[in-house]
Amino acid sequence: MAEKHPDEFQLLSYVEEELETDARQEVAEHLVACRPCAEQLRRLEAGRTALRAAPPLELSDERRARMLAALP
């Protein structure tokens, strides 16, 4: 993968450990050699950590009902 950068979806899948073994290995090898991709991965990991640490959003029953009614 050194000649081709992983896209953001591949990096997200890498962070979430959802890639197949071969694809995960390719991304891991690329990250060793590519500083911009490694930095993007670091930002994705930080975002995931922040989202997991955030308290759940509290919605009123009225707001929840309006949101559900607006869904297709």
Image: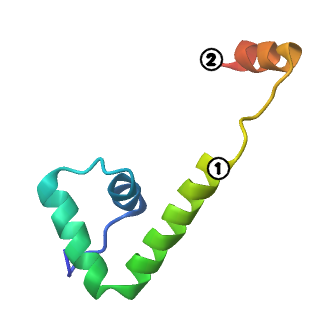
User: Residue 18, relative to residue 30: is it above or below?
Assistant: above
Instruction: Report which quarter residue 12 is drawn in.
Output: bottom left
Mark number for residue 72? 2
Side of 33 relative to 70 (left or right): left
Q: Residue 56 placed where, x, y %?
A: 71, 35
Question: Which residue corresponds to the image point at 18% horizontal and 68% vertical from the top-left?
Answer: 26
Count the marks: how many? 2
Helix, strand or loop for disc 2: loop
Determine the residue located farthest toward the left in the rendered image: 22
User: Residue 22, relative to residue 60: is it above or below?
Assistant: below
The disc, 2 or 1, on the residue closer to the chain's N-terminal end is 1
Question: Which residue corresponds to the image point at 27% horizontal and 87% vertical from the top-left?
Answer: 33
Side of 26 relative to 72 (left or right): left
Amino acid on which the number 2 mark rests in the picture: Pro
Side of 6 relative to 59 (left or right): left
Question: Which residue corresponds to the image point at 76% horizontal and 34% vertical from the top-left?
Answer: 57
Instruction: Report which quarter residue 50 is drawn in.
Output: bottom right
Q: Quadrant of the N terminus?
A: bottom left
Q: Residue 4 placed where, x, y %?
A: 24, 75
Helix, strand or loop for disc 1: helix
User: Residue 9, relative to residue 31: is it above or below?
Assistant: above
What crowding class fits label 1: few (fewer than 14 Cα within 10 Å), some (14-19), or many (20 or more)?
Answer: few
Residue identified by numbered label 1: 53
Q: Residue 9 placed where, x, y %?
A: 39, 55
Mark nearest the camera among 2 and 1 is 1
Q: Quadrant of the C terminus?
A: top right
Q: Residue 44 placed where, x, y %?
A: 50, 63
